[in-house]
């Protein structure tokens, strides 16, 4: 677990296949080595207002953005056959990825999944406050960075016991 990818997705609506932002942080040997932040045009560039209220991304922001099937090739190497971590990943981020790939008729890769919500049993904002981790909540890259920091903390704590 020396190397892993932390991911976070923001969606435009309640449908799991409506990704509008991807945040990805690659960690190798305890250090962040790569960050990816991509705005994605969801199907029909359609948003629910309450989702705009959560993350602040609007149809205008993604009007000229590529659709997920056009950016998957940039994301897949960080996920395929890798250790992947997300906060609340088991109930949100991993199903979002699976449903989006299914929507575009693409094969979901194999990867090892970890969820920092399951590990720490608290929400991201509270954990970031507790551990003094910077967070611009519901920005996919910021959430992914925070998740990476939490997982690094978990790894360090696991090695101490």
Image (cartoon, helix red, strand yellow):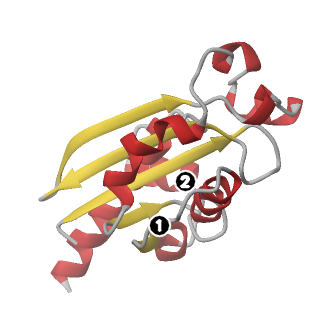
Q: Which residue is mark 1?
A: 116
* In this picture, residue 23 sits left or right of residue 91: left
Q: Which corner quadrant of the image does residue 68 belong to?
A: top right
- Quick one: quadrant of the C terminus? bottom left
- Badge 1 crowding class, 10 Å Cα cut-off, few under 14, some 14 to 19, many 20 or more, is many
Residue located beneath label 2 in the image? 124
Confirm or deny contact between disc 2 and disc 1 (CB under 8 A): yes
Question: Which residue corresponds to the image point at 44% horizontal and 72% vertical from the top-left?
Answer: 114
Q: Quadrant of the N terminus?
A: bottom left
In this view, the residue farthest toward the left is 29
For this orientation, the residue located farthest to the bottom is 161
N-term mark: 2 or 1: 1
Query: Which residue is at a point 17% across and 67% down the rendered structure image?
Result: 2
Question: Which residue is at the front of the view, 54 or 39?
Answer: 39
Say above or below: 65 vs 21: above
Q: Is residue 133 visible?
A: no
């Amino acid at each position: 677990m020396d190397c892993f990818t932390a991911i976070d997705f923001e969606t435009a609506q309640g449908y799991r296949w409506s990704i509008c932002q991807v945040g990805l942080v690659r960690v190798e040997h305890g250090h962040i080595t790569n960050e990816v932040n991509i705005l994605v045009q969801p199907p029909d560039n359609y948003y629910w207002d309450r989702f705009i209220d959560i993350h602040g991304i609007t149809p205008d922001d993604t009007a000229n953005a590529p659709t997920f099937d056009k950016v998957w090739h940039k994301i897949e190497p960080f996920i395929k056959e890798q250790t992947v971590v997300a906060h609340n990943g088991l109930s949100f981020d991993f199903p979002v990825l699976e449903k989006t790939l299914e929507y575009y008729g693409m094969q979901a890769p194999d990867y090892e999944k970890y969820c920092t919500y399951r590990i720490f049993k608290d929400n991201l904002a509270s954990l970031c406050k507790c551990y003094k981790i910077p967070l611009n909540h519901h920005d996919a890259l910021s959430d992914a960075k925070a998740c990476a920091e939490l997982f690094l903390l978990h790894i360090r704590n696991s090695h101490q016991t």
